[in-house]
Image: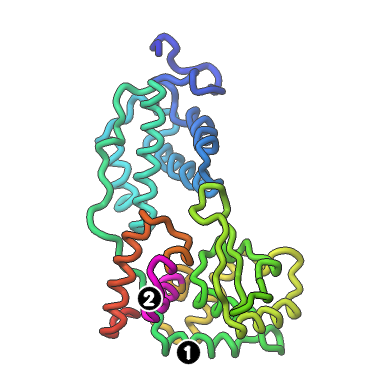
């Protein structure tokens, strides 16, 4: 690609317009298009865009992409962890490193930059910390607390229904938000089944069936009568559900914040302790065989901590 076309006088509208003098800010829309064509979800595109906007905040949005070096990217990552003043979890840090690697690999493969500066950037070493899980006694405490929550003068069915759903199924927050009443199969011969649909074609299991208890189905029916949702089961924001879980945890005096992630791990470990086949647990969680390797190791470790009484610490 010729260096004669230096800083463009207009925002490039196709990858062929890019070169090493192109400002970072002008590459982001084209990178978004690339991600969408590659089948990335809207959530991923939004997250990667946010990460690049942080890079622009730190280095300047008008910085030419050819100016980025491995040292500059490492300085940016250090700023995220220690200089920005905003907490950066291990998971978020890992995603931001991934963003840099995907973005600069894309530029390098286009011939925009001669060397990929993100290739030598290292992820954090060591395994991610284990999530706390609930003991059986804590689950009982949480269910009792949820049952006592009110909606005005009447008992509120949503907290207990939500909590029992997550303990039984281990589904993600995004999956819970997509559930509809039609996803509950009450005619199953052995036990009711919940159909959980993947968001995009890249999902490992586009649709999977998870058994649920009759008790949860009865709670769901009471909830539907109380809230009368028109489309999805939960007619509120995901953040509202997070607040409900936190409120349940506070009322039950759970020492760590109750969350979707904690309940997902709790469900997985409970299934493991009942001797459910590990491949069935993997399918229930909607995980690929590759991602299951790390998840399985964590479940084994959490089971050991549970047995020693340390899992909720």
Please, what secondary structure does the residue beneath circle 2 have? helix
Instruction: Mark 2: give few (<14), some (14-19) or many (20+) Cα within 10 Å.
Output: some
State the residue position of label 2.
272
> Does residue 261 appear in this view?
yes
N-terminal-most mark, 1 or 2: 1
Q: Identify the residue shown where x is 31% and y is 45%.
A: 77
Q: Farthest residue toward the front?
A: 189
Residue 128 occupies quadrant: bottom left
Q: Going by the image, does 265 lie left or right of 127?
A: right
Residue at the (48%, 81%) spot, across then down: 249
How far apart are labels 1 and 2 at the CA level?
22 Å
State the quadrant of the N terminus: top left
Would residue 57 be counted in the magenta stretch?
no
Location of residue 29 in the rendering, given as x and y in whole percent from the top left corner: 53, 32
Residue 307, quarter of picture: bottom left
Category of crowding for the residue at label 1, using alpha-carbon neighbours closer than 10 angstroms: few (below 14), some (14–19), many (at least 20): some
Q: Is residue 235 visible?
A: no
Q: Which residues are magenta?
A: 264-280
Label 1: state its secondary structure. helix
Q: Name the quarter where the C terminus is drawn.
A: bottom left
């Amino acid at each position: 690609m010729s260096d004669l076309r230096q800083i463009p006088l207009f925002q490039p509208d196709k990858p062929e317009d890019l070169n090493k003098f192109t400002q970072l800010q002008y590459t982001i829309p084209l990178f978004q298009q690339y991600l969408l064509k590659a089948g990335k979800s809207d959530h991923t595109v939004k997250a990667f865009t946010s990460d690049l906007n942080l890079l622009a905040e730190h280095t300047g949005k008008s910085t030419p992409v050819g100016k980025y070096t491995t040292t500059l990217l490492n300085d940016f990552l250090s700023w995220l962890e220690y200089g920005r003043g905003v907490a950066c979890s291990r998971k978020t840090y890992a995603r931001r490193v991934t963003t840099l690697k995907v973005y600069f690999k894309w530029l390098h493969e286009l011939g925009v930059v001669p060397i990929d500066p993100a290739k030598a950037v290292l992820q954090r070493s060591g395994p991610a910390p284990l999530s706390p899980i609930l003991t059986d006694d804590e689950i009982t405490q949480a269910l009792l607390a949820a049952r006592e929550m009110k909606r005005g003068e009447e008992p509120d069915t949503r907290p207990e229904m939500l909590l029992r759903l997550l303990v039984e199924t281990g589904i993600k927050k995004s999956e819970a938000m997509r559930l509809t009443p039609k996803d509950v199969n009450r005619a199953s011969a052995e036990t009711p089944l919940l159909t959980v649909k993947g968001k995009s074609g890249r999902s490992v299991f586009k649709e999977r069936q998870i058994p649920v208890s009759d008790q949860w189905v009865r709670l769901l029916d009471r909830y539907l009568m109380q809230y009368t949702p028109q489309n999805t089961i939960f007619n509120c924001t995901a953040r509202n559900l997070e607040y409900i879980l936190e409120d349940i945890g506070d009322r039950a005096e759970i020492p760590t914040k109750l969350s979707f992630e904690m309940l997902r791990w709790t469900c997985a470990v409970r299934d493991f302790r009942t001797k459910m086949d590990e491949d069935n647990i993997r399918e229930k969680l909607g995980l690929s065989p590759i991602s299951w390797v790390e998840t399985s190791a964590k479940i084994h470790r959490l089971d050991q901590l549970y047995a020693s009484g340390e899992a909720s610490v």
